[in-house]
Image (spheres, rainbow, N blue to C red):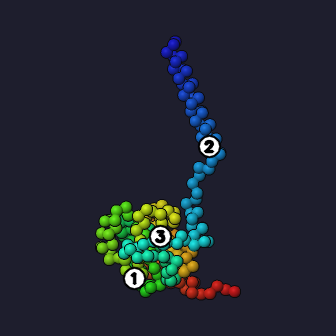
Amino acid sequence: MKFNRQRLLGLVGLVGFLLGLYGLWTYLKQRYSFEAPPIYSSVARFERDGVPMIQAKDVLDRDFDLLARTEPLVIVNFWASWCAPCVEEFPSMLKLIKQMKGRVLVVAVSMDDEEKDLRAFLKIFKVPQPGFEVIWDRDKSIGRSYDVGKLPETFIVGADRKLRRKVLGIEDWASPNAVAYFESLIAQSATPPPQ
């Protein structure tokens, strides 16, 4: 009888402990918001207020300031050399800048952890080059300011430096549809607003 009584007391104690934990969790949930912000909360802000301005040294140790650039369209692409989809889409970005002849700037923001990996990748693709800037986000601060969560992640930015579109995942940036879309964005930025 003693053995069963101890078991029963242990079971009652465990149930009481679990009810106490549940009560604490319920209280904390009501008192503090544990819900993550919507995944696209930054998109609306970037469309309204503009994307975070990038002021950094590029991989050639030159000053880069996104606000000072004059290209009517900017593609800010977050990538890493270890990211297979990033590697797959990289050539289409290089092809795009050749097709657009200075009207599009690609800012490739590397999220690599090791500089040697980044340098090997840049050597293979022969970048940076005119119209294609490369920045190493060593401390991931640029990625955090853009709320980057997955690679590749790309932000298409107009002449006013406001977000036009966010693209998650791989894209063929030089496809006829993509080029037509970029041409339409450039034409919109060149057209004065109606009065």
- Cβ atoms at labels 1 and 2 below 8 Å apart: no
Instruction: Residue 154: give its label.
Output: 3
Q: Quadrant location of the C terminus?
A: bottom right
**Three-letter code for the amino acid on which mark 2 is drawn:** Leu
Q: Which of marks 3 and 1 is in front?
A: 1
How crowded pointer 1 is (Cα within 10 Å; few <14, some 14-19, many 20+) is rated as few
Residue at 37% across, 61% down: 113
Q: Position of residue 91 (x, y in %)?
A: 36, 75
Instruction: Residue 28: give its label.
Output: 2
Q: Earlier in the sequence, mark 3 or mark 1?
A: 1
Residue at 43% across, 69% down: 109
Work out whether residue 191 can be spotted: yes
Q: How far apart are marks 1 and 2 (CA)?
A: 54 Å
- Dot 1: what SS? loop
Residue 80 falls in which quadrant of the image? bottom left
Q: Nearer the viewer, residue 74 or 186?
A: 74
